[in-house]
Image (cartoon, grey):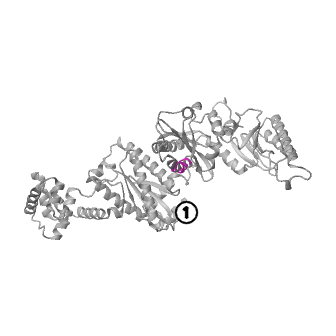
Amino acid sequence: MPVHEGEEGHHETGIPLRRLLLVVGDPVMDVAAAPAGLDVRVDNVTILDPEDRTEAHAGDLVLLIGARGGAARRLVRALADQGATAVAVKTGGHAPPEEVLPAGSSPRTHRRAGKDEMAGLRAEAQDAGIALLAVRPEVRWDQLQSVCQNIVHDTRPSAPDELGEASGDLFSMAQTIARLTNGLVSIEDAASRVLAYSSGSEVDELRRLSVLGRRGPEPYLAVLREWGVFTKLRSGEEVVRIEEHPDLGIRRRLAIGIHAGSQPLGAIWVQEGSEPLSEHAEEALLGAARTTALHMIRQRTQTSAGLRLREDLLSSLLEERIDAAALADTVEVHADRGALVVGFSVASQAAADGEGDPSGEERLGPRDRPERELRLRQLIDLVSVHTAAYRRSSLVTELNGRVYVLLPDLVRGREGWLGVERSVLALTRKTVLAARSTLDLEVQAAVGSLVERLADVPASRAEADRVLDAMGRDLERGMSWEVATISDVRSKVLISETLAYLRDDPSLRDPRVSRLVEHDRSGGADLVHSLLVYLEAFGDARVAAERLHIHPNTLRYRVRRATSISGIDLGDPGERLFTQLQLLLELHGPA
């Protein structure tokens, strides 16, 4: 038996029929009879064929297919006796083609017979005390069951430990979407319950009531249903625009359905505040809906199809702990198509100081780590939104403080791989710009080379890491790179890796350069920096002096002093090259 209010130690289960009808409702089905009112609760949705054994349970909404006349009335009575909450039947409002009409009848008489049959069913349901719903003839039973069952499922309470982490991810996602769209965001399930929402003022009456009640208010849901909003949200990945209606307390807003395949999971709503929505709000919503679907699946099922497994699998592939086949079999990407990795890094104080931990973790105190984790989670959400809009099969994960994106299933176009690489670079620049403007994070990104097999993805990731390392060292010297490929920074990558080799093996260093460095440190001179700038200017004293903001004669004097103290012969090309490398190591060193 269903649990009702007032029973000690219990809570009601299921969803009120009224609420189910508000979400599904017209143009799908209408109420034909409701002898116990519309607050009766639905806990399960089943399909019953007349040839099957009649079996129902308390709280069931039974979709009755194919029954006609007296047989249908008997089934309605039997379902009521077994405790079912409601039964749904197809209406007879549309006549079938004439070739399938009973002999001697016309479409008009058939429609009249259909109305008479519905009247008989209505009287039977009224007498039996069961709700009767009339379903439009064109509605498919399997689709109706999927939609209704999904709405009912979303009202079932989750265990606190399951809901806590996942809902926290959704609140982070809502805040990220709000920054990208410049609006006020709420994420709702298929039953219009508010799962998460962004902060902000300038709320309209619809948002205020939704957030306070943690679900869409019924009068507003009815209006949105009349406007066809829910039908559009369930139908696919269309961004729905709702114009401002001051008389109803509704500001302009955008909405998009969240789906898992053909199954609707909920919707994302973005209300416009005092400022207009951003130019790319609709594109951001598309990626957000695809990413949020994974969060909601994890919240609902906690199974291997969830978001964390995807993150773990990608991490394992990038670190070569699993092979490409294991990833391809699980997340349905093609192992024999092109792919590449994009890496994102937040510029840290550690990198700016030239220290060895690229994530900055070693420098963080206990109070700093939660803030860093929040920033990283926000960056993951933002990157996920943008890349999902670009390619549905994209995967995002985090390793050692860096965020990595795998873009699989890339196909060579008319320009070969050039067109693909250009589009990925454009996507990456847009993502970095969004991170800097909406999250206020100094983010850099490196696009690894495109590989033609999924198995070679670790090589693309390693190349992205080499580029990020070089970009971090450039940032320390005052050159700000936002997005780069190996071709952009190849020389810097090679030089920095050479310097790392020199640092790890002190026996390779020239003691004469070390002597000059020690002289500067003890005497407060600036010979090392002057000599390095002179060598970088190919020995052109005027160019080097201009960079140092000194007179050329002053620079020439410093160079002579440097060679005199150290004993270095600048006439030897090999000594010039090695001196320049070691001076770079002494002044900056690899991070």
Q: Is residue 354 visible?
A: no
Residue at the top extreme of this rendering: 6
Going 65% across and 30% down the picture, which residue do you hit? 8
Q: Position of residue 189 (x, y in %)?
A: 59, 43
Quadrant of the rendered structure where residue 20 is? Answer: top right
Quadrant of the rendered structure where residue 251 is? Answer: top right
- Give the main secondary structure of the magenta stretch: helix
**Is residue 392 placed above or below 374 in the rendered structure?**
below
* Image quadrant occupied by the N terminus: top right
Q: Is residue 428 left or right of residue 249?
A: left
Q: Position of residue 360 (x, y in %)?
A: 33, 50
Under circle 1, the secondary element is: helix
> Which of these two is toward me, 230 or 379?
230
Marker count (numbered): 1
Going 46% across and 64% down the picture, which residue do you hit? 419
Residue range highlighted in magenta = 287-296
Give neighbour class at mark 1: few <14, some 14-19, many 20+ (Cα, 10 Å): few
Q: Is residue 29 visible?
A: yes
The residue where tag 1 is placed is 329
* Image quadrant occupied by the C terminus: bottom left
Amino acid type of the residue that numbered disc 1 sits on in the rendered structure: Asp
Is 288 one of the magenta-colored residues?
yes
> Which of these two is toward me, 221 or 319?
221
Is 131 one of the magenta-colored residues?
no
